[in-house]
Image (spheres, helix red, strand yellow):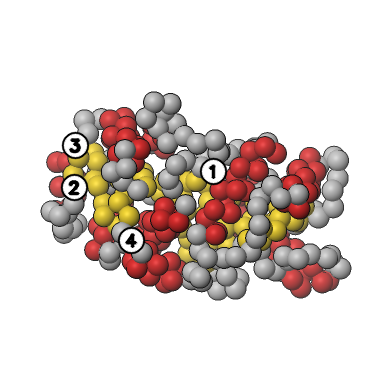
């Protein structure tokens, strides 16, 4: 079982090496993390983009890229298309965003002819490691889906479950968050959270999954809070997944964990045929490296 970020890196190193297609690899921060991940034995990268610019960055950063496959792409749209097609053709195992707008990359991912569409919903899954919580917290979706419907939440939940199970966790505990733990018809989020719990009990999410909702944040992460409030729960204080009701809640919790709690993190997009590593310029070097490792481990286990 993967219990910490060191375990994650080691698992990525010890498994079959995954091939990573980097769309528009002419990004200094991304290229540095990709090269380091390759040198650590985590991935075998394919660098797609403006090859001259990639080589200039590599020289400036003293990065050795001579042994990697480089593929020329005249435009960012071409870089996205080429990278996605390589994954679709089996030449690469997963995908990473470089110096390219997310919308451009996802347009290629969702292309009906050569893309990586599935019946699922694209959703962002973040992993957080913090000394104040005894295990990983997986947060979804604070990055893509603005105000998901109940049907979309089902798919978002399933995506997160796939990530957690790739870590060897036998029972995945999901908290469907809301502002309070009681169902209130005037608060549709609470109604949907309870419906997700009912679906889980009916077998919608398969074996080895517990979904509870609605749960306020304190009840999700603190067993003591549940005891004080006399709230009966199978997962309080031991949740794996925080399923947020909308992007504002997810964005707020995620940034609070990063900037106030100083949590280390990694993130990928799920719901396509393969994981997509999508990092921000504001993400730390470590976060980029961990995200590559996360994508590699999930790609090897889905």
Which residue in the structure is indicated by mark 2?
A: 69
Which residue in the structure is indicated by mark 3?
A: 72
Of labels 3 and 1, earlier in sequence is: 3
Which residue: 74% across, 71% down?
223
Q: In which quarter of the image is residue 145?
A: top right
Q: Residue 123 carries which label?
A: 1
State how far apart marks 2 and 4 are (Cα). 18 Å
User: Is label 4 or label 3 in front?
Assistant: 4
Of labels 4 and 3, earlier in sequence is: 4
Secondary structure category for the residue under label 4: loop
Residue 35, given in percent of the width and then of the height, sits at 25, 57
Above or below residue 80? Residue 259 is: below
Instruction: Give the residue furthest to the top.
Output: 113
Which residue: 28% across, 34% down?
82
Taking 210 as reference, is 302 left or right? left
State how far apart marks 1 and 4 are (Cα). 26 Å
Secondary structure category for the residue under label 2: strand
Of labels 1 and 4, earlier in sequence is: 4
State how far apart marks 1 and 2 are (Cα). 29 Å
- Whether the residues at callouts 4 and 3 have beta carbons within 8 Å, the answer is no
For disc 1, the neighbor class at 10 Å (few under 14, some 14 to 19, many from 20) is: many
Q: Residue 169 carries which label?
A: none
- Whether the residues at callouts 1 and 2 have beta carbons within 8 Å, the answer is no
Which residue in the structure is indicated by mark 4?
A: 16
Which residue: 86% across, 45% down?
184
Of labels 1 and 2, earlier in sequence is: 2
């Amino acid at each position: 079982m993967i219990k910490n970020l060191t375990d994650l890196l080691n698992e990525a190193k010890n498994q079959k090496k995954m091939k990573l297609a980097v769309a528009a690899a002419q990004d200094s921060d991304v290229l540095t993390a990709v090269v380091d991940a390759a040198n650590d034995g985590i991935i075998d990268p394919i660098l797609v983009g403006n090859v001259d610019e990639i080589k200039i960055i590599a020289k400036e950063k003293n990065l050795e890229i001579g042994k990697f496959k480089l593929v020329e792409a005249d435009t960012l749209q071409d870089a996205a298309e080429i990278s996605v097609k390589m994954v679709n053709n089996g030449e690469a195992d997963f995908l990473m965003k470089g110096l390219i707008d997310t919308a451009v990359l996802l347009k290629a991912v969702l292309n009906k002819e050569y893309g990586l569409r599935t019946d699922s919903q694209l959703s962002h899954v973040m992993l957080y490691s913090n000394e104040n919580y005894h295990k990983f917290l997986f947060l979804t979706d604070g990055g893509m889906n603005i105000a998901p419907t109940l049907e979309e939440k089902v798919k978002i939940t399933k995506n997160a479950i796939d990530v957690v199970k790739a870590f060897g966790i036998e029972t995945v505990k999901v908290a469907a968050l809301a502002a309070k733990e009681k169902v209130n018809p005037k608060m549709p989020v609470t109604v949907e959270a309870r419906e997700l719990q009912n679906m889980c009990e009916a077998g919608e999410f398969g074996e080895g999954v517990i979904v509870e909702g609605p749960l306020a944040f304190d009840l999700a992460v603190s067993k003591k809070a549940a005891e004080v409030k006399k709230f009966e729960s199978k997962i309080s204080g031991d949740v794996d997944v925080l399923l947020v009701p909308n992007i504002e809640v997810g964005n707020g919790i995620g940034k609070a964990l990063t900037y106030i709690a100083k949590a280390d993190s990694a993130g990928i997009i799920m719901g396509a045929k393969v994981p997509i590593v999508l990092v921000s310029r504001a993400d730390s070097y470590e976060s980029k490296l961990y995200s590559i490792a996360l994508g590699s481990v999930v790609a090897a286990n889905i």
